[in-house]
Image (spheres, rainbow, N blue to C red):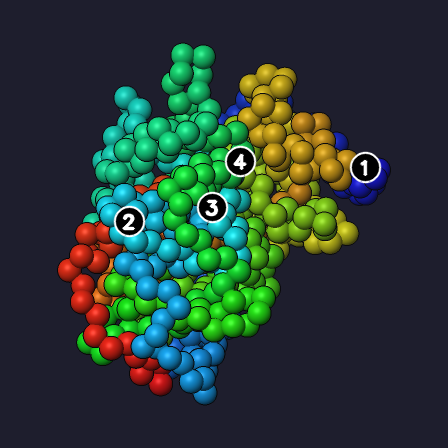
Amino acid sequence: MSFPYTEEMMESVKKVEATRAARMAAEPRRMTAEEKDALLEQYHPDYNLSSFAEIIVGPNKGEKAPKELVELLQAKSRVQGMTLDLAHPDYDVDVLVIGGGGSGASAAIEAHEAGANVMIVTKLRIGDANTMMAEGGIQAADKENDSPAQHYLDVMGGGHFANVPELVEKLVMDGPDCIKWLNDLGVLFDKDKDGNMITTHGGGTSRKRMHAAADYSGAEIMRVLRDEVQNRKIPVVDFTSAIEIIKDTEGKAAGAVLQNMETGEILIARAKCVIIATGGAGRLHYQGFPTSNHYGATADGLVLAYRAGARLLYQDTLQYHPTGVAFPSQIYGALVTEKVRSMGAQFVNVNGEAFMHPLETRDVAASGVIREVSRGNGVHTPLRDGIWLDSPMIDAIHGEGTLEKRLPGMLRMYLRYDIDMRKVPIVIYPTLHYQNGGVRVSVNGMSDVENLYVAGEAAGGVHGRNRLMGNSLLDVIVFGRNAGQEAGKQFKNVTLSDLTLEHVD
Ligand code: MEZ
């Protein structure tokens, strides 16, 4: 492969290089609250009303959600017309965990620790999840100059104060202990020569509290969680999708109908408690956006819980990560971690101008990129117009070798296409990254349906209407563990009556 930037792109690179020293010397300006509100209203995809539809049935009737999600929530059931022997289940467990990512694994570990007979079912394999693909890091207020209260304020501000306060409190208060739990399990966080965790800023953070393992933080966390699940011999049924939640005649969650993805075989799992940990929805490609998500991210948990009677919260707010790959096309939409900007890289337009502070919150930053491109200031590439992310600034600020050491995954990803991001800027455009909302849960992780718990990205409320970087990995661990612990207590009090799928009708 040869260096793929066109002549036109290289003309613009010269302008980026020409302004670099001056940009590095100047302090980028932050937008005012009024500027941010106006920007969001005009350019954030959540405000594009034509891509939303009204929900016409169920607990959120009358509210709006992305059209693609509405279709799934209201689709005919896959079990319609099937004769299912619910009285003779194929699996009978205390706690059924649906989903094999970070929150599912954390939940299973804690439920197992509490003495439950646990089973994980996942439609792909354990670890095929957005957790595995998380790059930049995990927030937690465990440094001397920081506190959970400070973290709380950042989370609430980032979420436009729409967050459920009790959930935010749990997130930030449990944060430090979760880092310790992961560290003790064997996660290799970046540390300085004295063994202290290295932490950086993310967009919208008032303190450096982003803990990372280079730029593959999620993969490192998932590696350890998966090991722990295996060490505990927790059974994992893979390539098997949950297609409906089963309830008992008293309305409690009581298991799930499963379908083997390879053979099509239908299986029944009975459980005293069910934990949904199925992650997000990026693969629904809302509004035609590319996504940074893994292939299994298709809103399964929202649909399962909704059809069982659980309410959704903020199902109409999505996160578009400001820096998805815009070029080259082979990796279109892949994540360029926010850590690139945490380390100093700026957004620069085709004329070499820095038009926005690099660490505005994600909704604001994504809207700023969309606006700049729509104003005709984008970099023209063969695939789509985007914005420069001035990655050579990182070594210029921190010294040669920094990018390679702190962002090895990014460097490798681009080098495959002969783009050396230490030497030339890269082109980005927002990519669908996260569902800010999800199933409404209380602090014990339970949805509106008794004994149906939801954790991680499938749950809504923690992040309000916009999540900050690094609070997803934290959410996954805090609320995954929490759901496992709560279900691990609850199952002991549960006596199931007959199983039913009447709610689906
Ligand atoms: O929390 C995230 O979404 C995250 C850390 C992403 C990233 O930019 O690396």
Name which residue type carries label 2: Ala
Residue on which the image places disc 2: 111
Looking at mark 3, is its residue's CB closer than 8 Å to ligand 1?
no
- Mark 4 falls on what kind of element? loop
The percent coordinates of residue 93 (x first, y second) are 31, 60
The percent coordinates of residue 96 (x first, y second) are 34, 59
Q: Can I make out residue 276 in this image?
A: yes
Q: Nearer the viewer, mark 4 or mark 2?
A: 2
Decide: is 411 above or below 233.
Answer: above
Horizontal relation, residue 250 to residue 101: left or right: left
Q: Nearer the viewer, mark 3 or mark 1?
A: 3
- Whether tag 4 and tag 2 are in contact, CB under 8 A, the answer is no
Residue on which the image places disc 3: 131
Residue on which the image places disc 1: 3
Name which residue type carries label 3: Thr
Q: Residue furthest top?
A: 194
Q: First in sequence, mark 1 or 4: give its number.
A: 1
Looking at mark 1, is its residue's CB closer than 8 Å to ligand 1?
no
Decide: is 30 above or below 18.
Answer: below
The percent coordinates of residue 210 (x first, y second) are 41, 32
Give the alpha-carbon distance from disc 3 to disc 1, as whole Å: 32 Å
Q: First in sequence, mark 2 or 1: give its number.
A: 1
Give the alpha-carbon distance from disc 2 to disc 3, as whole Å: 20 Å
Decide: is 335 above or below 200.
Answer: below
Residue on which the image places disc 4: 216
Q: First in sequence, mark 2 or 3: give its number.
A: 2
Most foreground residue, 69 or 486: 486
